[in-house]
């Protein structure tokens, strides 16, 4: 029993940064811009968050710095793909490579150090005393608590505000949006940059909040999982959050199983989340093809006003 | 943002002695080039309140370019636009909208996944919701449109999409309305209905620019006409007192005679293609519903209908690209030529050269290649012969096919498909978007191959073209054949009705 309770609790913690990264990517993709640089932005967020925390001994400042760093890297993507209409896939891959290299360089002296500042768990009074669910749900840090509200907030933003209508229009039919007076370029810039901020936070969650250490390449491909989660969640923030939590649980299961010593190679166990992603993607993709929901029609296509 | 502007430029009371109406739009010296092609060359145009002005011109004359400048999508190289005396900043769709200019683009520019309401309010300060839906419904009713405000745009018919695009402009209170070839997607009765709505809007004080290349429509609805030829204004006058012939000479110039290659009747022989009760489904919808069709050697069968009524499925089925899901297709032709509607996507390989494209049907012949290689000099000599025979506008057979104009592309396609003297020719929208000379060449090729003994199917939205070429006419509506006529018993009005799904027994 405690095995499963622990797995769920760990799953929530591991799912949280994935949710941030995936929700950020969702915002950019809703505006029509695919950003495959999530992994790079997470790594930059992780290293900058860690460095700022070490320097200031303040984890809150560290997290903020990580958000800004992720947004800064994303703004490169925005300028190149929205402004100069560079191929989004090529640019995203470039950013991932750049982010990995740059983070390794910046973090060279920080491996093995302690951050000095912390983001602590805040048990919710009364609720955290509840049997079973208390420790699973109500004994976490503020980023965990915030994530469902952020997902719902993004849903409301997309479907219940003018900005959301414009964002969706820019992603679906930028030509139609532009002709209607929607500032398509501004919206695409904003969406990509904000999305990058989310990725930066997600990266720093690993280094500053969860492991409290910096290691090269520490996000271990989770940026890619975040991108897959957006597809899995059919571009719906609520489903994306649920997907992130499920994935976090599978990821956590791997550690839990290793710690109780099941007689399976740890390498095979570590594969689980990725196999899971693959299966889920296949299922979603076949589902997507049949329904008229999901992928923004203008996703991945640069918009040029004077093109035919 | 939603305040109605209709009052600002109110037209004189009907019947009131005509004091000169105010000028609402003044275009001076607009020039716009793409590379070395001058699409608009010092174009002037004036629009008065309550006026319907036709902008008439051949395909490629520069009509769409001009209105793209007016709505801020294109930044002109030179020239100015003023609305009620105030200059419009160039290159800003927002500024054009704020000045009251609204365009119904040829492709409508709607968001398929948005509801009617979301499409209508996009760009205003609202996002939708119950109350706004109510308001959109009221505006639709006032305009005489039956549109469900909650329906997604992808579920609408082409006619409804056009109404939605117009509603969008009315809702925003825009009063300079520009419609780019709105009748291209309508059946004749639907077009007549649109003309009624346009007249009502103009009587209500709005000013309208109506783009077309059909002379009869100019006479039917417009007060004034501006005629563009090769990007230049060649006439700007009242419609009253102009007749169709005068207009066509102005629009086309000395080529005017080329348009009428009135064809003689064919001489039908054995059946080369037979479709029996053929049904085709695409993406879950029935694209063709139990269609029967017989094509004989030496006849042209014309398929009339508004785009989107199963033409694509019929063309691909007739050409043998798709198989019927029910029913049958029997074809005894040894070579089938297919001139698809999407020339670039389905007909040619844009990144390859003219000569490579021209050899696509023949490259495997022993005359052209060995199993391991292609004789490129033979490819080139084939290309040179076809370039000459079809007057393809390229000097070098190695130039990229993607750089050709619409007429050039179609000539390459025809040359490749017809060189083998096929027994069956399927041509979908064969003259759409072509200049007069290319259209004439396409038609005379089709007639020539019919006279040689090929069976020909011509699918076209242009009813005049169908009536001119065909020995037999079928009308396609919602994937079914809803009428069939033989040469000599063509009734333009009745065919028009059936194209819109009316007049069926
Ligand atoms: N965005 C563009 N890029 C390059 N050439 C264009 C573009 N738009 C139009 N043209 C060219 O300008 C000319 C006029 O086109 P257009 O204004 O669309 O004519 P119309 O609407 O009268 O048929 C054509 O030769 C066309 O090929
Ligand atoms: Mg046009």
Image (cartoon, coloured by chain):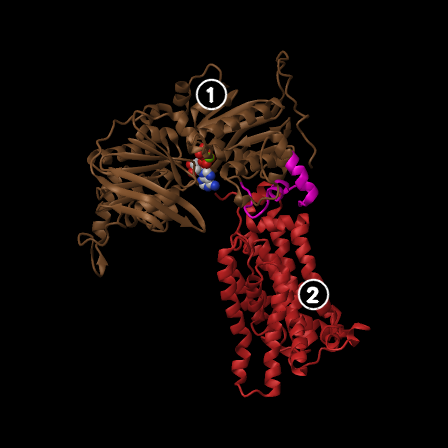
Chain colours: A red, B brown
> In the rendered image, which quarter contains the C terminus of chain B?
top left
Disc 2/disc 1 C-alpha distance (Å) = 64 Å
Q: Which structural element holds mark 2?
A: helix
Where residue B96 sits in the image (x, y, percent)?
A: 61, 35
Q: Is residue B267 above or below residue A142?
A: above
Q: From what the image shows, is residue B194 above or below residue B317?
A: above
Q: Is residue B135 magenta?
A: yes
Judge: label 1 CB < 8 Å from ligand 1. no
Give the percent coordinates (x, y) of residue A246.
61, 70
Q: Which residue carries the number 2 mark?
A: A147
Residue at 64% over, 61% down: A238
Question: Which picture quadrant has residue B395?
Answer: top left
Which chain is disc 1 placed on?
A: B
Residues indicated by labels 2 and 1 sit on the same polypeptide chain: no
Give residue A3's mark: none
* Image quadrant in which you'd find residue A22: bottom right
User: What stretch of residues is rendered in magenta?
Assistant: B109-138
Depicted A159 relative to depicted A21: above or below: above
Say whether residue B397 is visible: yes
Q: Callout 2: residue from which chain?
A: A
Q: State the residue at coordinates (56%, 37%).
A: B165
Quickly name the residue at label 1: B219
Residue A144 located left or right of residue B348: right
**Of helix, strand and loop, which one carries label 1?**
helix
User: How far across and how far down the image is residue B304, in percent?
Assistant: 38, 34
């Amino acid at each position: 029993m405690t095995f499963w309770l622990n797995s769920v609790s760990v799953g929530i913690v591991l799912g949280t940064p994935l949710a941030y990264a995936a929700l950020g990517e969702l915002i950019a993709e809703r505006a029509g811009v695919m950003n495959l640089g999530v992994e790079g932005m997470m790594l930059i967020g992780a290293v900058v968050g860690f460095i700022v925390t070490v320097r200031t001994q303040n984890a809150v400042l560290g997290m903020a710095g990580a958000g800004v760093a992720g947004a800064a890297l994303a703004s490169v993507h925005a300028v190149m793909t929205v402004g100069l209409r560079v191929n989004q896939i090529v640019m995203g891959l470039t950013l991932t490579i750049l982010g990995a290299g740059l983070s390794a360089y910046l973090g060279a002296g920080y491996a093995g150090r302690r951050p000095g500042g912390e983001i602590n768990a805040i048990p919710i009074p009364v609720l955290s005393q509840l049997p079973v669910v208390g420790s699973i749900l109500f004994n976490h840090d503020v980023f965990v608590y915030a994530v469902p509200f952020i997902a719902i907030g993004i849903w409301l933003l997309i479907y219940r505000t003018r900005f959301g209508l414009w964002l969706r229009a820019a992603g679906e039919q930028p030509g139609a949006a532009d002709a209607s007076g929607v500032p398509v370029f501004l919206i695409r810039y904003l969406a990509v940059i904000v999305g990058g901020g989310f990725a930066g936070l997600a990266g720093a969650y690993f280094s500053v909040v969860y492991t409290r250490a910096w290691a090269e390449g520490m996000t271990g491909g989770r940026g890619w999982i975040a991108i897959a989660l957006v597809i899995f969640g059919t571009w719906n923030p609520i489903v994306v959050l649920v997907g992130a939590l499920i994935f976090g649980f599978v990821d956590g299961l791997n550690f839990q199983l290793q710690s109780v010593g099941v007689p399976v190679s740890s390498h095979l166990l570590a594969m689980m989340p990725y196999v899971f992603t693959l299966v889920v993607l296949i299922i979603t993709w076949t589902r997507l093809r049949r329904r008229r929901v999901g992928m923004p029609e203008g996703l991945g296509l640069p918009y040029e006003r004077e093109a035919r | 943002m939603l305040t109605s502007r209709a009052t600002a430029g109110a037209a004189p009371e009907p019947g009131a002695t005509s004091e000169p109406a105010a000028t609402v739009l003044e275009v001076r010296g607009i020039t716009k080039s793409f590379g070395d092609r001058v699409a608009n060359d010092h174009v002037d145009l004036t629009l008065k309140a309550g006026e319907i002005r036709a902008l008439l011109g051949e395909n490629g004359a520069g009509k769409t370019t001009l209105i793209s400048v007016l709505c801020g999508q294109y930044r002109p190289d030179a020239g100015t636009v003023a609305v009620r005396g105030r200059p419009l900043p160039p290159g800003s769709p927002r500024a054009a909208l704020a000045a009251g200019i609204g365009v119904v683009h040829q492709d409508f520019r709607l968001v398929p996944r948005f509801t009617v309401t979301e499409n209508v309010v996009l760009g205003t300060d609202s996002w939708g919701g119950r109350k706004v839906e109510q308001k959109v419904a009221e505006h639709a009713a006032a305009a005489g449109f039956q549109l469900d405000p909650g329906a997604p745009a992808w579920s609408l018919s082409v006619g409804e999409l056009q109404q939605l695009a117009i509603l969008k402009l009315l809702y925003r209170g825009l009063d300079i309305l520009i419609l780019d070839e709105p009748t291209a997607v309508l059946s004749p009765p639907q077009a007549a209905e649109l003309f009624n709505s346009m007249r009502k809007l103009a009587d209500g004080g709005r000013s309208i620019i109506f783009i077309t290349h059909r002379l009869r429509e100019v006479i039917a609805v417009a007060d004034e006409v501006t005629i563009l030829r090769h990007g230049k204004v060649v006439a700007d006058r009242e419609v009253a007192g102009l007749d169709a012939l005068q207009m066509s000479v102005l629009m086309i110039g000395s080529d005017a005679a080329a348009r009428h290659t009135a064809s003689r009747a064919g001489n039908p022989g054995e059946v080369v293609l037979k479709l029996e009760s053929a049904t085709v489904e695409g993406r879950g919808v029935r694209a063709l519903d139990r269609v029967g069709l017989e094509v004989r050697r030496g006849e042209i069968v014309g398929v009339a209908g508004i785009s989107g009524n199963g033409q694509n499925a019929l063309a691909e089925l007739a050409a043998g690209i798709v198989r019927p899901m029910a029913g049958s297709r029997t074809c005894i032709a040894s070579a089938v030529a297919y001139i698809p509607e999407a020339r670039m996507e389905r007909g040619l390989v844009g990144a390859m050269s003219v000569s490579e494209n021209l050899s696509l049907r023949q490259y495997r012949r022993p005359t052209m290649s060995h199993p391991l290689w292609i004789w490129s000099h033979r490819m080139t000599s084939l290309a040179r012969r076809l370039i000459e025979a079809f007057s393809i506008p390229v000097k070098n057979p190695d130039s990229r096919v993607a750089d050709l104009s619409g007429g050039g592309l179609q000539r390459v396609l025809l040359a490749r498909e017809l060189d083998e003297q096929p027994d069956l020719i399927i041509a979908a929208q064969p003259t759409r978007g072509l200049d007069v000379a290319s259209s004439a060449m396409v038609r005379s090729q089709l007639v020539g191959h019919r006279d040689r003994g090929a069976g020909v199917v011509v699918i076209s939205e242009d009813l005049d073209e169908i009536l001119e070429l065909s020995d037999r006419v079928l009308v396609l509506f919602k994937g079914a054949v809803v009428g069939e006529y033989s040469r000599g018993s063509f009734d333009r009005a009745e065919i028009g009705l059936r194209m819109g799904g009316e007049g069926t027994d």
